[in-house]
Image (tube, rainbow, N blue to C red):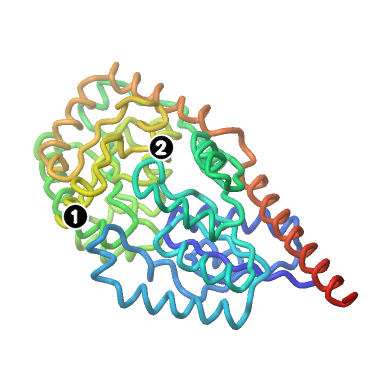
């Protein structure tokens, strides 16, 4: 019996996690075919990309509004494909505004829905848990504290661990303080979405000017996500060829310190153990909504959320200025003890995220739900034949 699996991975970190998941599912279900939304890594795994991930690569309320036409066209295309090819099961990864709408259609068609990587219900828009209960068969969560949230709501949930625990290796050495003070190595991670680059480019341009003025021998690397055009990002940030990197993990292993846009990259940096400061900037309208309607007062960086304290300095919106970030960089360069203490705290995040083998656990849950659905369908067919 052939197995067709529909999958949505709408940005770089989801594409990475989904590619590993696909690889594990194929071990359990040889010959399974995958199609849906994805990026380069899913293509490498043989998935048929119906809608490229970059089509949905937006963040913030105003950015969704600006690209509403593109997102709507992608949504309609996905719905048409689902109707025509009705998959055996669907795996939706993160991207809640899009995926929960797709889940509604899937449930109407009787397709089991697995949601991998939970929306941040604990931070904002908690009412979405009602939609999840209606439209999702099982949640696969990657942070231990999320399991209790869904259990209380009566939603089937499995804590499968975080995919980065197995993928990202901790660094083994740090350079001497005297060397760092003379020629610091600094990684700047601007984000993986076009909208993030547009908001962050002026900040990072100004920051690089300050770094080069104060530390003429400083080396800078800027990793560019595979969901973005290298030439476009280089132009926006004014990068020299030597400053461009295609591998964020290598850059973080190389760097003494980093400046990282909020998102999955902050957890990657923590698991590697590179001291860093976090920044993020959105449009004025998105910022107003976040402050006045959502009123979230907690940390925005996952390392700080996991550890329950501000280990990493967070520079959000007005505080995400070149001057503020440079002040944090300069402090980290000059304080070897503070860097090492931060690195030690960051590396402790690994123990909070479960054991390795998360993708095997996630794949097994997908296959179990697939078997359950088929068994139910067979019973239904048998019952209808008897009547």
Horizontal side of 285 relative to 91 (left or right) equals left
Image location of residue 357, percent across then percent down = 64, 40
The total number of labels drawn is 2
Give 214 or 307, whichever is nearer the viewer.
307
Q: Residue 240, which numbered label?
A: none
Q: Position of residue 266 (x, y in %)?
A: 36, 40
Query: What is the x, y in percent for residue 247?
Result: 41, 50
Q: CA distance from mark 2 to mark 1?
A: 23 Å
In the image, what residue occupies the spot 65% across and 57% down?
23
Between 271 and 179, the residue placed more toward the observer is 271
* Residue at the spot of label 2: 253
Q: Is residue 138 above or below residue 143?
A: below
- Mark 2: which secondary structure? helix
On-image quarter of the N terminus: bottom right
Above or below, 357 against 117 in this view is above
Q: Nearer the viewer, residue 26 or 189?
A: 26
Query: Which residue, given by chain and number where applicable, does mark 1 sit on?
Result: 201
Query: Residue at left 25%, top 68%?
Result: 65
**The quarter of the displayed image where residue 319 is located:** top left
Picture quadrant of residue 230: bottom left
Q: Residues within 10 Å of mark 2 (few under 14, many from 20)?
A: many
Categorize mark 1 by other alpha carbons within 10 Å: few (<14), some (14-19), many (20+).
some
């Amino acid at each position: 019996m052939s197995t067709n699996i529909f999958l949505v991975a709408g940005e770089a970190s989801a594409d990475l996690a989904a590619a590993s998941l696909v690889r594990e599912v194929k071990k359990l279900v040889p010959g399974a075919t995958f199609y849906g939304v994805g990026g380069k890594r899913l293509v490498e795994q043989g998935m048929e990309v119906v809608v490229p991930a970059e089509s949905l690569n937006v963040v913030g309320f105003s950015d969704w509004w600006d690209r509403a036409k593109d997102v709507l066209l992608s949504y309609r295309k996905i719905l048409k494909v689902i109707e025509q090819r009705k998959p055996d099961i669907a795996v939706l990864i993160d991207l809640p505004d899009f995926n929960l709408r797709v889940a509604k259609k899937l449930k109407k068609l009787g397709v089991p829905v697995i949601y991998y990587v939970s929306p941040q219900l604990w931070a904002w828009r908690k009412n979405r848990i009602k939609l999840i209960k209606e439209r999702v068969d099982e949640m696969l969560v990657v942070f231990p504290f999320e399991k209790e949230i869904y259990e209380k709501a009566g939603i089937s949930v499995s804590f499968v661990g975080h995919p980065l625990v197995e993928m990202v290796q901790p660094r083994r050495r740090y350079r001497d303080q005297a060397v760092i003070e003379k020629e610091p190595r600094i990684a700047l991670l601007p984000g993986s979405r076009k909208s993030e680059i547009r908001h962050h480019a002026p900040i990072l341009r100004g920051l690089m000017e300050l770094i080069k003025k104060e530390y003429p021998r400083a080396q800078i690397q800027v990793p560019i996500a595979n969901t973005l055009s290298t030439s476009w990002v280089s132009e926006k940030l004014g990068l020299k060829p030597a400053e461009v990197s295609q591998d964020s993990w290598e850059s973080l292993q190389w760097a003494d310190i980093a400046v990282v846009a909020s998102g999955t990259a902050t957890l990657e940096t923590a698991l590697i153990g590179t001291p860093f400061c976090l920044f993020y900037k959105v449009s004025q309208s998105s910022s107003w909504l976040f402050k006045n309607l959502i009123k979230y007062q907690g940390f925005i960086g996952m390392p700080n959320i996991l550890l329950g304290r501000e280990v990493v300095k967070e520079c959000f919106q007005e505080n995400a200025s070149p001057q503020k970030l440079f002040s944090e960089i300069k402090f980290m360069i000059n304080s070897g003890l503070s860097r090492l203490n931060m690195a030690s705290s960051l590396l402790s995040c690994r123990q909070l995220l479960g054991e390795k083998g998360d993708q095997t656990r996630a794949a097994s849950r997908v296959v179990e739900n697939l078997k359950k659905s088929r068994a139910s369908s067979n019973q239904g067919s048998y019952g209808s034949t008897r009547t």
